[in-house]
Amino acid sequence: MPQTGRIVFQKPEGEFEVDFCERQLNLLAHAQAIELEIGSRCGGHGVCGGDRVKVILPGPERERRLSPITEDERRHLSEAELQEGWRLACQCFPQASNDRLTLRVPPGARS
């Protein structure tokens, strides 16, 4: 039986699950699909840097399972943050539609 995709957003107030994972949707769009606010103030254009999420995967696994880091992400996130797994949800796409991802949203993130 094929694995079904899902994305779990961990916020201080609990976990919020999206019961699908689509390659053509960025992580912000997945959160928006369940009306979960994660901090985007610019509408997902990579301008505000507010929709930060930490991907809970080891470095090589993150690189394989997510889209490459964008220039917008490099502008808003330090090299240390990128190495720790922080990404901008509006700039980051899953590489497989059947993937399972867990993302940590920092405290206070809201639109």
Image: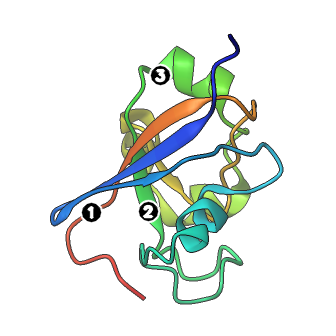
Kindly state the secondary structure of the residue where label 2 is placed: strand
> Residue drawn 52% across and 89% down?
41
Query: Residue at 36% across / 36% down in the picture?
Result: 84
Left or right of 109 on screen, residue 59: right
Return the disc, 2 or 3, that comes first in the chain's sequence.
Answer: 2
| Residue that carries the numbered disc 1 in the rendered image | 106
- Residue 20 vs 49, above or below: the answer is above
Place of residue 109 in the rendered image (x, y in percent of width and height, measured from the top left): 32, 76
Q: Amino acid at mark 3?
A: Gly
Where is 92 relative to 57, above or below?
Answer: below
The structure residue drawn at horizontal position 61% and vertical position 60%, both measured from the top left corner, is 30
Residue type highlighted by circle 1 = Pro
Q: Which residue is mark 2?
A: 52
Query: Are discs 1 and 2 less than 8 Å apart at CB?
Result: yes
Residue 33, picture quadrant = bottom right
Compared across the picture, whether 97 is left or right of 57 comes to right
Q: In what element is the residue under mark 3?
A: helix
Total tally of numbered discs in the picture? 3
The image quadrant where one finds the C terminus is bottom left
Q: CA distance from mark 1 to mark 3?
A: 19 Å
Label 3 CA crowd tier, 10 Å (few <14, some 14–19, many 20+):
few
Tags 2 and 3 in contact by the CB under 8 Å rule? no
